[in-house]
């Protein structure tokens, strides 16, 4: 890595600290606005609970202290990377997240890879046939997919591939109790991944298709493409080597921005497919007012998003050597 | 007449054949029972929380002193092989079974029983004080004997030893520090359980599944039949239904599926749907009414509201036929305490409107007599639709209702801490005795800010208080039954809540699963006799 790039990465990582802390502080205060707390919920779950019982829980969870004290304690712990205990599960928050994060990352990365690769290919294909039947069909299909809600699409895919055709599992991340290891385990997970990754990724395929098509058409109008054509290069070479690299920048930008969006979308997809990721954990934590868990997940998510954006910045440099990181 | 006779003979023969057929079917050893429920349990012990998902799984791992038979929960030997009760009902002596081992191999002794009640149930279980508050001392003369000495009789003590209510916990698995600092909820055993039950934990992949495996050292010879019990965590209701339909999952217990899906699946030939097996929980739904202000403080108004709601329609349309109209505070499936002579609540909107006229609430502009706000329990879309139906029906008799939506945290706070509501749907359990499940909602000493599922209505009736306290200190029998009959009559007349539906817990399972329904808490028993064909 070049020295300038290294310094850039270092500086950006240092900038992350105040940003993430500010997000955590904001989340902490925002979540306190909702009425009720984890002690109420847990006492409610237990059926009839006395006032003393609920107060005892509140003391156990440290929710009986004044808000400013809770805030200072939380932020103090956060500085030492201690995310605290989940109120309802009474397990360290970091353990719960570490259990779930890999599943979400696998799903997200597969979905975004699918979306970017397929989206780029179809986008280029459409741009090369601008105005012709194939281009129009692709545009209509992209629009349809773009307008389809993920949870519905997921259920329809289950009905088709799992019930009618019976060729793919309806949910879960692995065959329970099969005890696969090594390659068999990887294949098993991949097998279970196909439907959820497709469900999550299709929406983005549509976006990248549209974006790549527009971006390619713009590049096609530039002088260097005219020059390339004048040199007698084939259309294929022009499209895949000259135009594509230049047209990729907006796609990469959008992909970076959408990492956060994708995390949100994974909540629905994980729910439909019973995929054991963070998405569902965040939803349950919110309903159960498990603030420590919720804050922990939001904290880790913001770190993931910030790092993803950093990676995007680095990819810029690869795509366009004129971009210098300073 | 004659043909009827022949027909019934044929029926009898047919029935005999069916019975003989099922008697021939011998329990088969082996196999895996997979069930699904959502949300995922947060712990594997009902000490941490008695939420349904926790009770479902932990009752296969932990046991209590007794087992139960039938809807009325008749006590049978369990970890205690026999017991005696003194004539004054103040001393209970339990003889423990010899040779019972915890999953870690250590012996189960009377010390564990004493510890489970004194240190765990009384301090951590939300109903621990209700069950054992009147216990004066627990003595352990030897390793196999436990003596409970009571300050006053506890009529339901023998029904308190259910695995979800009073699980036996191994004393040796808790550190002194965890006990002293009251950090039991954080103990390792909450996530890595050590019980005496027929199944023990094999694997828990959070968010995905839990696998319990057969306890080879289980104290009942030849049991359990199953090799494994698996919980599949599936957050989406439709996906759960598909898994049951496809046979990927054998059982969806305790209304684990959306009502519309339950209705659909109950018609499939390879599945069984049943509301039996939850009588000991006694689930009931009502409209909780805030009696602090007019017009709801007026009993005539409440009676009119009750009369304006068609409970049969609620059951059929909103709940897809799941449940039956409530006839009072005690569910009709409770054979020990329900007054079977109680009629259904009357549905008569014309009369309801007339009652409001008489009570001094004539129709004003736009036909509106007065306005109310309703909340609903945030348990899913059926509750929203029910609120919509009630709004519509009350509108017809001139009560304009505005519906307010809150999530669980907000709902609990508004109803039980702020008391800031007019009326709300609510859902509670009778449990195995009305002193446990009914008293809490209606006794005036339980009008306490911050106590959930308490008397949020501000209902005060000295006669009722007197009856409830009398019943609480009395053994079951005709005398006590008479008291409960009067309690039911008073509450039906006063309507501090509008009783709606005995909402059924529907269990749906694949026909290859046998022996599931055994008593009034069938899903909270240890399933040691369940087998797969």
Image: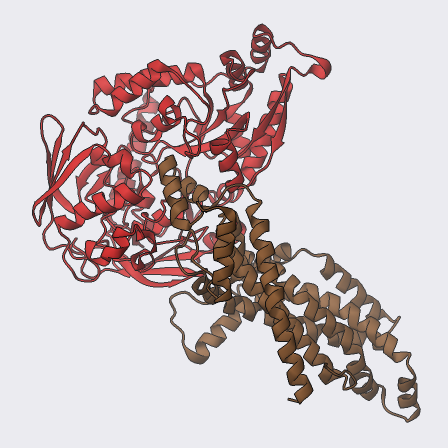
x, y percent for residue B364: 69, 12
Left or right: B407 in relation to B62: right
Q: Quadrant of residue B229?
A: bottom left
For chain B, what colour was chosen? Answer: red
Q: Residue at x 61, y 57 (%)?
A: A156
Q: Quadrant of residue A260?
A: bottom right
x, y percent for residue B130: 28, 34
x, y percent for residue A123: 78, 73
Above or below for B270 versus B84: below
Residue placed most toward the observer, B86 or A95: A95
Q: Residue at x 29, y 47 (%)?
A: B515
Residue placed most toward the observer, A226 or B342: A226
Determine the residue located farthest toward the bottom in the rendered image: A231
Q: Quarter of the image containing the N terminus of chain B?
A: top left
Q: Quarter of the image containing the C terminus of chain B?
A: bottom left
Determine the residue located farthest toward the top in the rendered image: B358
Left or right: A139 in relation to B248: right
Above or below for B174 versus B478: below
Left or right: B212 in relation to A202: left
Q: Which chain is brown?
A: A
């Amino acid at each position: 890595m070049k020295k300038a790039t290294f310094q850039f990465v270092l500086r950006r990582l240092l900038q992350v600290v105040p940003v993430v802390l500010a997000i955590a502080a904001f989340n902490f205060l925002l979540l306190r606005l909702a009425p009720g707390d984890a002690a109420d919920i847990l006492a409610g779950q237990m059926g009839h609970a006395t006032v003393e019982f609920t107060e005892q829980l509140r003391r156990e969870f440290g929710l009986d202290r004044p808000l400013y004290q809770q805030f200072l304690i939380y932020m103090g712990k956060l500085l030492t990377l201690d995310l605290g205990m989940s109120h309802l599960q009474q397990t360290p928050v970091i353990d719960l997240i570490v259990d779930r994060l890999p599943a979400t990352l696998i799903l997200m990365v597969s979905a975004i890879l699918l979306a970017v690769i397929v989206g780029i290919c179809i986008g280029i294909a459409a741009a090369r046939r601008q105005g012709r039947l194939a281009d129009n069909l692709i545009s209509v299909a992209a629009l349809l997919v773009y307008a389809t809600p993920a949870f519905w699409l997921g259920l329809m895919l289950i009905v088709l591939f799992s019930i009618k055709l019976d060729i793919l599992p309806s949910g879960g991340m692995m065959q329970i109790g099969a005890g696969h290891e090594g390659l068999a385990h990887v294949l098993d997970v991949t097998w279970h991944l196909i439907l959820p990754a497709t469900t999550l990724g299709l929406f983005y395929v549509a976006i990248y298709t549209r974006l790549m098509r527009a971006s390619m058409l713009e590049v096609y109008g530039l002088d260097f493409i005219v020059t390339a054509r004048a040199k007698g290069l084939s259309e294929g070479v022009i499209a895949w080597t000259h135009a594509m690299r230049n047209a990729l920048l907006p796609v990469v930008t959008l992909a970076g921005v959408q990492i956060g969006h994708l995390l949100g979308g994974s909540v629905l997809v994980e729910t439909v497919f019973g995929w054991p990721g963070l998405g569902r954990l965040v939803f349950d934590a919110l309903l159960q007012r498990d603030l420590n868990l919720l804050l922990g997940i939001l904290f880790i998510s913001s770190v993931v998003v910030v790092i993803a954006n950093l990676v995007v910045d680095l990819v810029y440099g690869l795509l366009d050597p004129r971009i210098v990181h300073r | 007449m004659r043909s009827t006779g022949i027909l019934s003979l044929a029926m009898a023969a047919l029935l005999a054949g069916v019975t003989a057929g099922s008697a021939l079917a011998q329990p088969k050893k082996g196999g895996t029972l997979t069930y699904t429920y959502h949300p995922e349990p947060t712990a594997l012990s009902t000490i941490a929380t008695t939420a349904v998902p926790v009770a479902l799984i932990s009752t296969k791992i932990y046991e209590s002193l007794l087992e139960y038979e039938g809807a009325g929960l008749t006590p049978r030997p369990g970890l205690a092989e026999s017991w005696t009760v003194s004539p004054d009902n103040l001393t209970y002596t339990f003889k423990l079974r010899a040779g019972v081992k915890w999953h870690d191999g250590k012996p189960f002794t009377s010390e564990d029983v004493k510890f489970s009640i004194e240190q765990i149930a009384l301090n951590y279980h939300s109903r621990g004080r209700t069950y054992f508050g009147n216990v004066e001392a627990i003595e352990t003369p030897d390793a196999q004997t436990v003596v409970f000495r009571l300050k006053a009789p506890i009529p339901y003590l023998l029904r308190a030893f259910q695995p979800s209510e009073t699980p036996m916990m191994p004393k040796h698995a808790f550190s002194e520090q965890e006990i002293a600092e009251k950090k039991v909820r954080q103990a390792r055993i909450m996530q890595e359980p050590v019980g005496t039950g027929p199944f023990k934990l094999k694997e828990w992949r959070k968010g995905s599944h839990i696998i319990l495996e057969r306890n080879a050292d289980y104290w009942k010879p030849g049991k359990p039949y199953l090799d494994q019990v698996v919980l599949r965590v599936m957050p989406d209701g439709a996906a759960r239904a598909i898994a049951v339909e496809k046979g990927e999952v054998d059982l969806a217990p305790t209304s684990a599926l959306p009502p519309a899906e339950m209705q659909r699946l109950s018609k499939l030939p390879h599945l069984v749907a049943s509301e039996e097996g939850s009588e000991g929980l006694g689930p009931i739904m009502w409209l909780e009414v805030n009696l602090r202000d007019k017009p709801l403080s007026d009993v005539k108004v409440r009676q009119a509201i009750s009369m304006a709601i068609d409970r049969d329609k609620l059951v059929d349309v909103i709940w897809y036929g799941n449940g039956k109209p409530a006839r009072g505070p005690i569910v009709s499936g409770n054979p020990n305490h329900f007054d079977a002579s109680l009629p259904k609540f009357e549905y008569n909107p014309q009369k309801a409107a007339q009652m409001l006229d008489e009570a001094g609430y004539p129709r004003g502009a736009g036909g509106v007599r007065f306005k109310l706000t309703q909340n609903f329990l945030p348990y899913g879309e059926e509750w929203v639709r029910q609120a919509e139906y009630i709004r519509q029906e009350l509108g017809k008799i001139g009560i304009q209702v505005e519906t307010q939506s809150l999530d669980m945290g907000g709902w609990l706070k508004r109803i039980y801490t702020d008391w800031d509501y007019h009326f709300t749907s609510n859902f509670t359990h009778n449990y195995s005795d009305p002193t446990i499940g009914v008293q809490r909602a209606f006794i005036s000493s339980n009008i306490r800010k911050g106590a959930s599922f308490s008397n949020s209505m501000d209902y005060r009736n000295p006669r009722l208080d007197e009856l409830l306290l009398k019943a609480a200190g009395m053994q079951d029998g005709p005398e006590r039954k008479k008291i409960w009959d009067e309690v039911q009559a008073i509450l039906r007349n006063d309507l501090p809540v509008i009783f709606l539906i005995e909402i059924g817990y529907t269990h749906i399972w694949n026909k290859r699963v046998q022996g599931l329904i055994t008593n009034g808490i069938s899903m909270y028993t240890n399933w040691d006799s369940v087998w797969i064909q």
